[in-house]
Image (cartoon, rainbow, N blue to C red):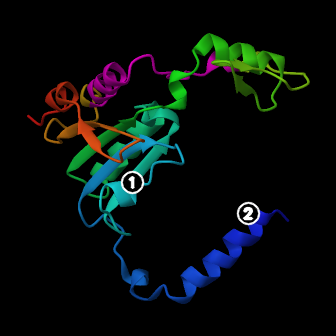
Amino acid sequence: MSQNYEEILKANAQYAATFGEKANLPLPPGRKMAILTCMDARLHPGKFAGLKEGDAHIIRNAGGRASDDAIRSLIISYKLLGTKEWFVIHHTDCGMETFSDAVMEELLEKSLETAVFEGGKWKDVGKGPGSSEGKYLKWLTIKDQKESLVEDVLRIRHHPLVPPSIPIYGFIYDVKTGKLIEVSEASQVGKAK
């Protein structure tokens, strides 16, 4: 077993030993909110948003993008679990800004092993075979953080299953300062009606 495997099991045993009242947390989030954000390991939504267990739904994916699955999760969060407001939070220095769909497709065609980022470019160093299946996925890469954030909030807002009464706020988290910076254009298009 790996070191991570062992450390996770040890940490979980300690966590479970003091679990206590957390066993009584209700299924719906206590603060009736959901956050869609990036999977980047530098982001800890519980800490930067002052949350504790049971407060909010946290939906994470590469880039914090409004993919079909993220929207599905937000709709479930609202329809079945009563969230009343949503936050879409992108961040500075996002890995999704470092490649395009074409680059990802090319890397996957060469091999399925991990690529490396050198000299400002992604390079495949793995042995083949790869796969051409990468061309069938939407990678939702980011060229401009503010533009992609507005695009994501608009995509959620205009989805036919999203009620207009839910406010959707747009923020960019600064990985160098820990600050949330509201993008007024995104919050404006996400305004509840």
Q: Residue at x 28, y 50 (%)?
A: 78
**10 sits to left or right of 40:** right
* Front residue of this view, candidates 16 and 126: 126
Q: Quadrant of residue 23?
A: bottom left
Magenta-colored segment: predominant secondary structure: helix
Looking at numbered disc 1 in the image, what kind of residue is underneath it? Pro
Distance between mark 2 and mark 1 Cα atoms: 22 Å
Q: Is residue 28 above or below residue 117?
A: below
In the image, is 150 to the left or to the right of 21?
left
Q: Any magenta on residue 149?
A: yes
Locate residue 74, reporting x and y percent: 35, 44
Residue at horizontal 21 percent and vertical 48 percent from the top: 85
Give, as a single range, the part of the protein colored magenta.
134-156
Q: Which residue is mark 2?
A: 4
What secondary structure is marked by label 1? helix
**Which amino acid type is marked by label 2?**
Asn
Instruction: Give the residue pinned by disc 1.
Output: 45
